[in-house]
Amino acid sequence: MMKWLIPLVFVLSACNGPGPGFHGGEKVTRRVEGSKFTLWIKQDRVVAIRTSSEVLPRYQEVARKAIIATQKETDCEAAWVVGDESLMWIGLSCDGRKAPKRPTRQSSLHCDIDDLYKRGESLAGYMTCQ
């Protein structure tokens, strides 16, 4: 039992990490209009991870809130944002400097919700992705 506990702790702790290239960056927690974000700030880039539970959040609304949180924290202008409802990368233009290039998307995954139902206090369902 104990031999599985330590690897499990490392795997679960990685779910709220910034990913490659952001280690050593500043970690900040911000709330905007009911959404909570963990921001990892490194130079002119930010990784914004939404850590609040929200039922079927819309990307445009979550991205807008992540940009507000980022701009309040950094005093820089957000030039672009890419990602999804849970994890976004934001490029900043600070002190008149150009923002970094927007990363290219490697691939897209499109999903349809086939069935959605309430299970206790939460929602559950099935998706078909291509």
Image (cartoon, rainbow, N blue to C red):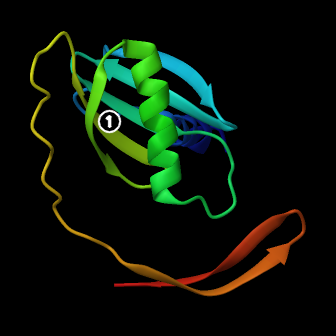
Looking at the rendered image, the quarter that the C terminus falls into is bottom left
Report the side of 32 relative to 123 (left or right): left
Task: Examine the rendered structure and indicate whether residue 64 appears above or below residue 91.
Answer: below
Mark 1: amino acid: Gly
- At horizontal 31% and vertical 14% (from top left) the residue drawn is 24
Task: Examine the rendered structure and indicate whether residue 47 appears above or below residue 22.
Answer: below
Q: Nearer the viewer, residue 69 or 8?
A: 69
Question: Dot 1: what SS?
Answer: loop
Looking at the rendered image, the quarter that the N terminus falls into is top right
Q: Nearer the viewer, residue 54 or 2?
A: 54
Q: Quadrant of residue 115?
A: bottom right
Instruction: Name the residue at the top extreme.
Output: 95
- At horizontal 32% and vertical 35% (from top left) the residue drawn is 19
The reply to whether residue 79 is in sight is yes
Instruction: Name the residue at the bottom extreme.
Output: 114
Q: Which residue is mark 1?
A: 19
